Structure formats: structure tokens, C-alpha cells
Image: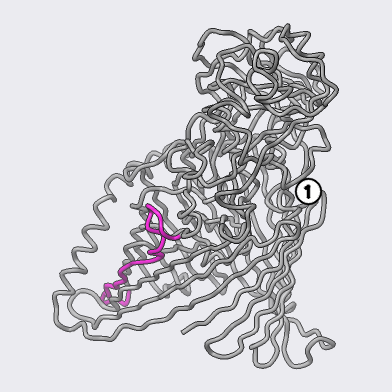
């Protein structure tokens, strides 16, 4: 596979000029006066209002979308030439009507720390006698700083002063606990405070350079940003026909490329990243995909002696690579709570922070700057190439595809290793400390290859869909290695069954669509250990914190009444390892050809927050007087920070039960 990877990367360099060449050819065709076909216009305006239990309004979004299609008459080399444009703009008023979000979100926090006096005595740090078990952060605590400035404080580690909550650069306001929307910390897990106000109001935790750093206006007007997301699509389509009936089609510009036919989760369909900040998993991919600038060429052989149909597709993504939008700390929709975690950790790095239940439950300490946290996020530029190819066809009634894609990970990876300071010493070490929770966010290059098959099984009247994919060199949190991150190949698959089925007691005239899917994931190089780096038996396994194997099940039941103007449906998705389920009954009412009302419930059941090794038992720092030297984790568990990856997108949203109403006018 290394040879294949090198060939892909070498070929990509030569492809950089292809979009310019093809667009120049098509532009020369436009100089002909024979392009008089009128443009067509379609679009909609809708109002989406979502209400979450115990939170209030989470969406008050108005969206306008316009689709323009301009066809040109055939002339010269090209036929079927057209220009397609989709423009979208939205405004979300939730930041004005719900003070849990926006400029006044959050507030001060207190940490439960009944073990602080005993630990302070062990460290030789002055600490006042107090009967109050709740300590708001302050650096340093009384009597060094008078009590009126912060009361009884967390224990400052004796390293380079940097600040904590209530420090000059890190005030105890505008905060929420990073996992507070998932659970109540009943497991005694680590507590991190995350700033939740927009980054132009409160810049703490927004230092990742063009990643999770939106201002209030960018959150309200999500499509109007530096990447011009209001321009959903703008591409030229043209076809060259050959005498033997073959065709060569070009599509050049910002577009969506669909490689799979799954719902909620993806296997092959990874060409475009996803905007999860719109509605987590639950938006249609057509709306949540982030279109990219792509050169898309497809050679269509049509029917041959062997195949009923066969085509070859080549993709070159010439727009700067983008990751998924996971939502930043303080947004209503932040899948996995990753935005809260990343913002909390970047604040720790830049401003210092107070950490509760660390290094053990009931103890709260202050970390100085550049000791723990996220230092920076890796960014890509226009020269970073992503390319792919696909063969698609039909053989004896079975539709199939073979796919390969070289691209940058769309999910962020926390990779340990940045030079940090020992919080227990006054010196500035600026060095790597093994097992330290100091990270950079990276998006490594991946190679995905796989295939699909679609066929119909007549005896059971069922259409079957199968997709498989193997992705090389994905990175996962691994608490057994010094940089807390390891690579592994990952095998993913899905089997989907679609069947129209009559349910007479619900509708005697129309069949219901029943669509079931099972998704599987296997991490090939998964590893776990029951002893740590110096041979101490661990309380729980250390190593990879993702599940080695997992299954997801989805079910869609959809009916149609009144000539399909009234469409009820039920969507169910279940994560087997996380033990959590989402339920989505809904109704789509097409009042007329122009007006439409969509009402959905979305609620979750199951285990919710799941603990994982949180690395509290590790000691990265030689200056720590309470540890016997450098050692990896001892297997102490809690939800924060890695349990969110075990809980998955359903488990981390266990408290996000919502009623969702959308009213749309389309034309």
C-alpha cells in the first residue's frame, strides 16, 4: 500500500492544473453566441425552531436558499453544458433569545474539594483552615492573596505562575463545566471549566487559529464566513461525446460528491466534510455536507460485453482541505462535546486553569500556563492535495463500486508531544514530558479504499446495500504510550435493507418504507494493557480508549397518506457499546406545492456518559513530590476527557431531548 500511496501523492501534483485547463476550454466554448437557454430558479425560505428540555430554545434559525441552473446549447466540442449555483444564507436568533448561548452565557463555578487541606499539607503549600468544601479557583490561595479576592482557593502547583479561575487573564465568569451538559460528575471524574461565550466576547480557549474560534456574528450568520459558505455550490458541467458512444463528463467547481447511500453514519461517503453544528447527526447529508472545490471527471463507457454499465471517476479537491465542523464550546450543537473539551484545554494552555477532582476525587489544583492543555491546531493550505478515484458499474444486475481516496482526516486528533513546563518547578523547562496531557490538534493524511454493492432480492422483495471501507493510519487516544496517541487501520462496513411493506392496520392502500441498517467498526491495531509503564497493575485497562469493535443499528419506518402529502416516520438509532438510543418520531405535512411543515421529536435513552481511562494516574513530571518518577496511567477512570469518545454521539447527547418544528415556503 505504500507504493499506492506514493503514486497517489505524485499524481496529485500534476493534477493541480487540470481545473484551470478544463475551465478554460469551457470558457472558450461560451464565446459562441448559441447559449440562449433561460435559467431556472428554485429555492425555499424556512424557519426552524428547536426546543430542548431543561435548556429552552436551541435553534431560532431562518434560512433562505436559491438554486440557479443555466443550460447552454450544444456547440463544438462540448454538449450538455450547464452552470449550477446554490446560494444559502441563514440567521440564528437563539443567541439573542436564550441567555445560555451568546454574549451573556455561563457564569462563575465552584469546585468541590474536601481533600485540599490534606494535600496542601503534603505539598507544603499554605492553605487556610476552612469548613467550606467548595473552592472557587484562585491563584495563589490565601493567605498569599487576601480572601476577599477569591475566598478559599484551589491548591496552586508551585511552578511558573500562570493563572487559574479568578486570575487576571482567566476570570471566574462566563464558564460552564465542559461535561456538565452530559452528566453530574457523580463518578468523581475530572472537572474542566470551559468558556462558553463567543470568541469576540471572550477569547479564552479560542487560540487554535481558524479552528473553533467563531465570533458572535459568525455563529448567528453561520454561512457568512471567511470560507464563503453562503456559496453552497458553483460548478460547470460539460460533456464530450465520442463516436463510439462513450462520454467524458467534467464537473468543475464547488460541489458535493456522493459516494454512499447511508443515513446518519457514513462509510464510503467521506469526500465532503460535515457540519455537525447544524443539528448533530440528524440533518440530511444534502444540507450538512460542506461543499468543496473539486475537479470531477467521469468517463462513461456505458454497456460493454461484460458490464451492463461501467464508468470511471477521478476527483481532485483543489480547495483548501477542511475538517468537520464539530461546534465550538458554547454552541447549542457540539457533537461529542468536543468543542467544550478543546476550548477548555486551550484555555488551560494559554491562561492556566483550575482542575477539579485532580489528581484524585475531592482535590482541586491550579495548573500554570504551558503545562497542560492544547497548544495549537494544525491548519492546511491550498497546496495540500486530496485526490480520489472510483469505478462504478452494473454486473449481472448488481450495482457496484470500487473506491479509493487520499485525504486529510476530517475528525481532529489530539496528539501529545508539545514542549511544556513542569508545574512543580519554578524553572521554564519547555520540553516534552511523556504521558503529559499536552496536545496539538492534527489532521493526519489518510488513505481509504473500499467498495459497495447494491442488488435486489426478489423472493423477499428487498433492496440490499453493502459498503465496506478500510482506512489506513487513523489515530486514536492511547494512554499506554508516551505521546498518548497511536495509529491503527480501521475497517468499517454497513449492510442496509430497504423494503416496501404493507401494514394494513395503519394503511390499507399504501406500503410503508422500512429501511434498516447495521454499521460495524473494527480497530485492527487496538491494544490494551493491565500493567502500566513501570509494571504497576492498573485499576482498569489502559491503552486505546475507543471500542475495539462496535455496532450501530438504525431503523426508518416511513408512511404516506393523502397522496403522500402527509408523511409520518420513525427513526431509531442505537449504539451497542455505548448502550444509548435515539428515537425520532416525525411528521412531514406538504400543505400545498409551496408550503410545508416538518415536526420532529428527538429524545434519547440509555447509559449516557461512560467512563474511560482519564490519565489521572500518570505522572509526567519529575518535579512531582508525590510520585515515584515518570509513569503511565494506572487506570483511574472518569468521563472527562476520553469517555466522550466511548459514549459516542448518541450517549454524549443523552440530555438533549428536543421538539423541532420547521415551516418552509418553497418555490
Number of numbered discs overlaid on the protein picture: 1
Q: Residue at x 48, y 66 (%)?
A: 90
Q: Secondary structure at mark 1?
A: loop
Q: Residue at x 61, y 71 (%)?
A: 455
Q: Position of residue 469 (x, y in %)?
A: 57, 51
Residue range corresponding to the magenta coloring: 223-246
Out of 533 and 569, give the one closest to the viewer: 569
Asked if residue 380 can be seen in this view, the reply is yes
Q: Position of residue 1 (x, y in %)?
A: 48, 39
86 falls in the magenta region = no
Is 437 drawn above or below residue 601 in the view shown? above
Q: Residue at x 57, y 30 (%)?
A: 170
Asked if residue 616 can be seen in this view, the reply is no
Label 1, on which residue? 608
Q: Residue at x 73, y 6 (%)?
A: 124
Would residue 22 appear left or right of 381 to someone viewing this image? left
230 falls in the magenta region = yes
- Name the image quarter holding residue 19: bottom left
Q: Residues within 10 Å of mark 1 (few under 14, many from 20)?
A: many
Amino acid at each position: 500500500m505504500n507504493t499506492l500511496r506514493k503514486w497517489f501523492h505524485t499524481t496529485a501534483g500534476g493534477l493541480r492544473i487540470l481545473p484551470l485547463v478544463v475551465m478554460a476550454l469551457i470558457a472558450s466554448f461560451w464565446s459562441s453566441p448559441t447559449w440562449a437557454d433561460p435559467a431556472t430558479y428554485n429555492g425555499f425560505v424556512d424557519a426552524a425552531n428547536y426546543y430542548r428540555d431543561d435548556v429552552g430554545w436551541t435553534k431560532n434559525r431562518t434560512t433562505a436558499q436559491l438554486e440557479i441552473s443555466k443550460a447552454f446549447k450544444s456547440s463544438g466540442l462540448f454538449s450538455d453544458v450547464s452552470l449550477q449555483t446554490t446560494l444559502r444564507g441563514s440567521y440564528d436568533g437563539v443567541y439573542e433569545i436564550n441567555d445560555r448561548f451568546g454574549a451573556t452565557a455561563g457564569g462563575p463555578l465552584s469546585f468541590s474539594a474536601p481533600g485540599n487541606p490534606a494535600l496542601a499539607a503534603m505539598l507544603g503549600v499554605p492553605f487556610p483552615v476552612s469548613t467550606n468544601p467548595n473552592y472557587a479557583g484562585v491563584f495563589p490561595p490565601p493567605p498569599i492573596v487576601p480572601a476577599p479576592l477569591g475566598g478559599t482557593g484551589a491548591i496552586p502547583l508551585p511552578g511558573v505562575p500562570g493563572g487559574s479561575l479568578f486570575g487576571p487573564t482567566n476570570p471566574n465568569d462566563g464558564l460552564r463545566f465542559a461535561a456538565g451538559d452530559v452528566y453530574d460528575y457523580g463518578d468523581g471524574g475530572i472537572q474542566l471549566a470551559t468558556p462558553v461565550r463567543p470568541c469576540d466576547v471572550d477569547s479564552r480557549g479560542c487560540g487554535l487559529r481558524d479552528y473553533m474560534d467563531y465570533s458572535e456574528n459568525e455563529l448567528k450568520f453561520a454561512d457568512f464566513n471567511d470560507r464563503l459558505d453562503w456559496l453552497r455550490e458553483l460548478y460547470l458541467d460539460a460533456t464530450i461525446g465520442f463516436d463510439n458512444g462513450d462520454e467524458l463528463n467534467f464537473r468543475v467547481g464547488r460541489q458535493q460528491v456522493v459516494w454512499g447511500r447511508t443515513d446518519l453514519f457514513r462509510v464510503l461517503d467521506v469526500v465532503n466534510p460535515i457540519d455537525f453544528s447544524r443539528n448533530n447527526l440528524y440533518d440530511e447529508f444534502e444540507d450538512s455536507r460542506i461543499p468543496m472545490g473539486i475537479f470531477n471527471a467521469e468517463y462513461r463507457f456505458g454497456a460493454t460485453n461484460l458490464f451492463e454499465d461501467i464508468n470511471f471517476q477521478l476527483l481532485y479537491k483543489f480547495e483548501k482541505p477542511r475538517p468537520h465542523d464539530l461546534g465550538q464550546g458554547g454552541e447549542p450543537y457540539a457533537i461529542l462535546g468536543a468543542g467544550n473539551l478543546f476550548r477548555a484545554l486551550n484555555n488551560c494552555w494559554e491562561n492556566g486553569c483550575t482542575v477539579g477532582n485532580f489528581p484524585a476525587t475531592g482535590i482541586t489544583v491550579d495548573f500554570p500556563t504551558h503545562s497542560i492543555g492544547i497548544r495549537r491546531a494544525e491548519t492546511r493550505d491550498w497546496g495540500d492535495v486530496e485526490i480520489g478515484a472510483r469505478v462504478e458499474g452494473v454486473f449481472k444486475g448488481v450495482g457496484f463500486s470500487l473506491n479509493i481516496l487520499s485525504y486529510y482526516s476530517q475528525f481532529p486528533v489530539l496528539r501529545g508531544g508539545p514542549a511544556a513546563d513542569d508545574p512543580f518547578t519554578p524553572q521554564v523547562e519547555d520540553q516534552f514530558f511523556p504521558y503529559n496531557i499536552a496536545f496539538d490538534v492534527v489532521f493526519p493524511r489518510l488513505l481509504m479504499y473500499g467498495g459497495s454493492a447494491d442488488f435486489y432480492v426478489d423472493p423477499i422483495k428487498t433492496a440490499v446495500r453493502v459498503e465496506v471501507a478500510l482506512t489506513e493510519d487513523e489515530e486514536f487516544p492511547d494512554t499506554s504510550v508516551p505521546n498518548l496517541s497511536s495509529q491503527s487501520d480501521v475497517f468499517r462496513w454497513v449492510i442496509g435493507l430497504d423494503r416496501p411493506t404493507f401494514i394494513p392496520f395503519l394503511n390499507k392502500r399504501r406500503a410503508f418504507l422500512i429501511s434498516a441498517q447495521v454499521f460495524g467498526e473494527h480497530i485492527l491495531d487496538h491494544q490494551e494493557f493491565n500493567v502500566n509503564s513501570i509494571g504497576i497493575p492498573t485499576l482498569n485497562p489502559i491503552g486505546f480508549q475507543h471500542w475495539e469493535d462496535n455496532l450501530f443499528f438504525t431503523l426508518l419506518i416511513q408512511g404516506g397518506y393523502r397522496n403522500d402529502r402527509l408523511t409520518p416516520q420513525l427513526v431509531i438509532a442505537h449504539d451497542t457499546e455505548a448502550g444509548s438510543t435515539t428515537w425520532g418520531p416525525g411528521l412531514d405535512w406538504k400543505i400545498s406545492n409551496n408550503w410545508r411543515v416538518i415536526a420532529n421529536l428527538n429524545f434519547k435513552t440509555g447509559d449516557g456518559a461512560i467512563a474511560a481511562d482519564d490519565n489521572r494516574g500518570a505522572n509526567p513530571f519529575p518535579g512531582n513530590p508525590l510520585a515515584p518518577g515518570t509513569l503511565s496511567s494506572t487506570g483511574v477512570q472518569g468521563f472527562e476527557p476520553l469517555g466522550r469518545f466511548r459514549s459516542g454521539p448518541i450517549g454524549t447527547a443523552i440530555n438533549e431531548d428536543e421538539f423541532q418544528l420547521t415551516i418552509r415556503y418553497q418555490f
